[in-house]
């Protein structure tokens, strides 16, 4: 397939190749087994951490590579293009951004170097709630200051990788919504030590989901956390979370681009060798054009499944797994309706819908 990465520097191209080569060692069989058991990819994450890829956005003074969002995006794209699932990787990259931008100097010195080496994992991000999904400002989890502690009560829903992380970033309301000027005020961000919290006010209940993201429901019942778990200023957490989410959107888009490239590469290889009615099925324009169209739009998915016929639905081809995994990004971390609402309102100047 023609290399279209002409706009990249030599270093970026070398980074792509190195990431892809490392990830390719983790075969479809590896991912299939984890997917069937809904197990976290420990060995894969440890290898990528050792190679420094998860610390790409951490500045050098805190032990990271000090590179930019472009390099982070390329890493995610290659992970997904190799057939892997980049969920845990993009999580750690963007969640640590809140600590980096808004944490105190002691917090940065305490956590970032350990995240860079892999001594600590920060891959859990607690925002969504049963009664407050897309409408984050309505969240009901509270953190009330009592002396040198905060006491946390409430519930979170669909929170990924809590049992595989040491730390979690939590968004909770510190001032009731009827006592703030703007509904985005009064929310605060905390860095929670999950190991300390579990069983002492934090109950984690795993949820079996369509795709393998180690997702959970969380219950907080008078969980006490030290007051210095607060990141930045009390009441300003909503904007801190948004800062991190901007990076997340870019990284998730890169996951999706990598998934699209994986689907296209699979579809091209299969339809070029599968002979039916005496010729490769890829010679038929009914098969070839959807793949070409997908390549042009980088919107694969269905074209890849279709061209594989029945095999597209068989586990050992990995296509049904990647199809489930890539489907997530239409709904989470933010659903497409709200993206279109943003374009309608802010790009096209149309009336706000919510
Ligand atoms: C596998 C998985 C992993 C996840 N991991 C995490 C995690 O680690 N941390 C975390 O905090 N969250 C996580 N989430 C949650 C995810 O971010 C939410 O599911 C998502 O934000 C949507 O919230 P909701 O499910 O409550 O849907 P709702 O907000 O209830 O929306 C339901 C539907 O209504 C539509 N809708 C709502 N309002 C409007 C509107 N104004 N205009 C048009 N359409 C509208 C939406 O598009 C959607 O289709 C995860 C979810 C999944 C599935």
Image: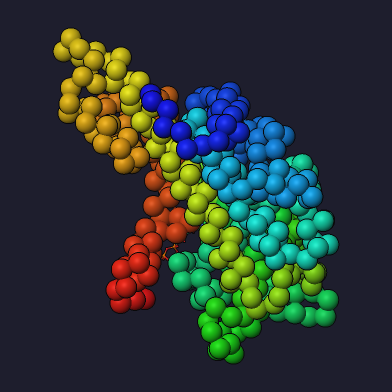
The C terminus lies in quadrant: bottom left
| Left-right relation of 283 to 114 | left
Most extreme residue toward the top is 278
Q: Is residue 35 visible?
A: no
Along the line of sight, the residue nearer the viewer: 312 or 63: 63
Along the line of sight, the residue nearer the viewer: 92 or 327: 92
Splitting the image into four quadrants, where does ligand 1 fall? bottom left
Q: Is residue 144 visible?
A: yes
The number of callouts visible is 0
Along the line of sight, the residue nearer the viewer: 143 or 340: 340
Percent x, y of residue 136: 51, 71
In the rendered view, tell whether residue 28 sits above or below residue 249. Answer: above
Residue shown at 56% from the left, 27% from the top: 17
In the rendered view, tell whether residue 351 sits above or below residue 290. Answer: below
Percent x, y of residue 350: 29, 73
Residue shown at 24% from the left, 21% from the top: 282
| Left-right relation of 248 to 320 | right
Percent x, y of residue 86: 54, 41
Residue shown at 68% from the left, 62% from the top: 101
Indicate the quadrant where residue 16 lies. Answer: top right
Indicate the quadrant where residue 319 lies. Answer: top left
Along the line of sight, the residue nearer the viewer: 13 or 286: 13
The N terminus lies in quadrant: top left
Residue shown at 69% from the left, 77% from the top: 234
Indicate the quadrant where residue 95 lies. Answer: bottom right
Percent x, y of residue 126: 60, 61
In the rendered view, tell whether residue 325 sits above or below residue 19. Answer: below
Colour convention of the picture: rainbow
In the rendered view, tell whether residue 324 sits above or below residue 207. Answer: above
């Amino acid at each position: 397939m023609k290399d279209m990465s002409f706009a990249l520097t030599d270093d970026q191209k070398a980074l792509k190749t190195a990431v892809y080569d490392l990830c390719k060692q983790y075969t479809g069989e590896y991912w299939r087994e984890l997917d069937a058991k809904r197990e976290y990819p420990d060995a894969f994450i440890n290898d990528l951490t050792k190679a420094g890829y998860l610390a790409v956005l951490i500045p050098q003074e805190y032990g990271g590579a000090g590179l930019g969002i472009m390099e982070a995006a390329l890493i995610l794209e290659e992970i997904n293009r190799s057939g892997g699932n980049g969920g845990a990787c993009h999580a750690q990259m963007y969640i640590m951004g809140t600590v980096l931008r808004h944490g105190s100097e002691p917090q940065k010195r305490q956590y970032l170097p350990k995240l860079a080496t892999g001594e600590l994992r920060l891959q859990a991000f607690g925002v969504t709630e049963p009664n407050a999904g897309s409408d984050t400002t309505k969240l009901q989890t509270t953190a009330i200051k009592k002396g040198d502690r905060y006491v946390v009560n409430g519930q979170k829903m669909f929170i990924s990788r809590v049992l595989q992380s040491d730390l979690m970033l939590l968004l909770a309301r510190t001032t009731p919504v009827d006592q703030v000027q703007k509904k985005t005020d009064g929310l605060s961000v905390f860095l929670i030590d999950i190991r300390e919290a579990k069983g002492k006010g934090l109950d984690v209940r795993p949820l079996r989901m369509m795709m393998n993201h180690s997702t959970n429901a969380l219950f907080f019942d008078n969980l006490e956390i030290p007051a210095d778990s607060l990141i930045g200023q009390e009441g300003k957490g909503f904007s801190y979370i948004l800062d991190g989410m901007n990076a997340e959107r870019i990284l998730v888009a890169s996951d999706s681009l990598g998934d699209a490239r994986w689907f296209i590469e699979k579809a091209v290889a299969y339809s070029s060798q599968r002979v039916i009615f005496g010729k490769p099925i890829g010679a038929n324009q009914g098969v070839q054009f959807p793949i070409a169209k997908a390549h042009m739009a980088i919107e694969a998915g269905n074209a890849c499944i279709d061209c594989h016929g029945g095999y597209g639905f068989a586990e050992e081809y990995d296509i049904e797994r990647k199809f489930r995994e890539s489907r997530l990004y239409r709904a989470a971390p933010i659903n497409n309706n709200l993206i279109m609402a943003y374009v309608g309102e802010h790009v096209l100047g149309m009336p706000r819908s919510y």
